[in-house]
Amino acid sequence: MLRSRRSISALAISAATALTLSAAPAVAEPATVPGGPWVEDSQHVSLERLHTYAELTDALHQLERRSKGNVDVSSIGTTNEGRDIWYAQVGTGATKVLYVTQQHGNEPLGTEAALRVLQQLGTSKASWVRDMLGEITLGVVVRANPDGTERFQRQNVDPGCSGAFCLPGVGYDINRYHDPAIDPADNPVPEAAAVQTLVRQWQPDITVDYHHQGSYVADDGSMITTSILWPTNAGVAPAVVDASKQVAVTVYDALSAYGHGEVSQYPGGDIAGIARNSFGLQGSASLLLELRGGIGQKSSGYLIRQAYVSMLAVAQAAADGTLASVDPSSADDIPPRGPAVSDEEE
């Protein structure tokens, strides 16, 4: 049986509950994708809490200024429509932790959580934040798919795309184009190429990729809030798989301790181009985290906090050394995901 080996600090839990960003200006509700993972066509949900590209750009640069340089914001590449793919970094520690959000444009809540984490770590004077950032450096690809986000679609924007994982007339599924055997210069997907270049150059120790799935229930009928999975490609070194499972158990314990979190094991594929497999093949402890989809406005705030708690839990465990003491075999006890209410895959 899984049991909590540690819990995120009380200060961090309090921050997860109370922290809010400045309200973003209201924006027109974009069209949803039929059967999409976050908002179904039949739902009438205000999306004004989500940042548009312009609002995200402003928020990141305002944070950079407010943090007095503690948060460094840069572009790691541009999309087919010329939007910057923003990357933010905070901390000076030797252990490198990378979070990637919103590879799929209609899976937005990880981005909102990442902004809150960056605000917390970049501007807080709390001793636990100072201690954490002395041990780790946190990097965040804050919305890997800005073109797709503006259309609230899964794919990037490339109407002329062709071949595997292309939706004709729309674009590519970014999260199938991370195969480390492919040189980023030869990658037809600029967003994936930018992430791959960053990973090759920076070589993070830990990488967590944030997505949304459909809505699923556990065997007892309770609603799954989060599903997680480590690399499953056969080429990933066993030591990296174990390190990835330690991250998985850390997330499981943190979300279970936070309350009302139902965490399951995600049934993902093993192809090398999927980000969690690619990161693992490159030596990074890697985890996919899928937040519940098919939700209404009331649930979205709670799921943002779940993502926020998971981000702080991994960062803190990496900083204080408790991550290394986690039994990786406990990850195998995480229950499998149950039947679907609505479908979508990583």
Image (tube, grey):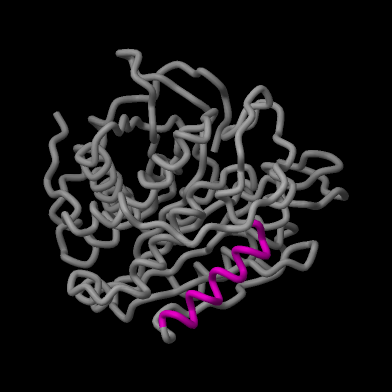
- Residue at the image point whose x is 40% and y is 50% from the top: 236
The C terminus - image quarter: top right
Q: Is residue 235 visible?
A: yes
- Residue at the image point whose x is 49% and y is 39% from the top: 270
Task: Judge from the rendering whether residue 157 lies leftward or rightward of residue 72; answer left or right.
Answer: right
- Residue at the image point whose x is 47% and y is 39% from the top: 300
The N terminus - image quarter: top left
Q: Is residue 339 above or below residue 50?
A: above
Q: Is residue 51 magenta?
A: no
Q: How many marks?
A: 0
- Residue at the image point whose x is 19% and y is 69% from the top: 128
Residue 271, position in %: x, y?
54, 42
Residue 75, position in %: x, y?
61, 75
Residues 231 and 17: in front is 17
Residue 298, position in %: x, y?
46, 34
Most prominent secondary structure in the magenta stretch?
A: helix
Q: Is residue 67 above or below residue 77?
A: below
Residue 71, position in %: x, y?
43, 78
Q: Is residue 56 magenta?
A: yes
Residues 114 and 186: in front is 114
Task: Judge from the rendering whether residue 75 lies leftward or rightward of residue 90; answer left or right.
Answer: right
Q: Is residue 324 above or below residue 198?
A: above
Q: Is residue 183 visible?
A: no
Bounds of the magenta segment: 52-67
Picture quarter containing residue 281? bottom left
Residues 274 and 290: in front is 290
Residues 122 and 95: in front is 122
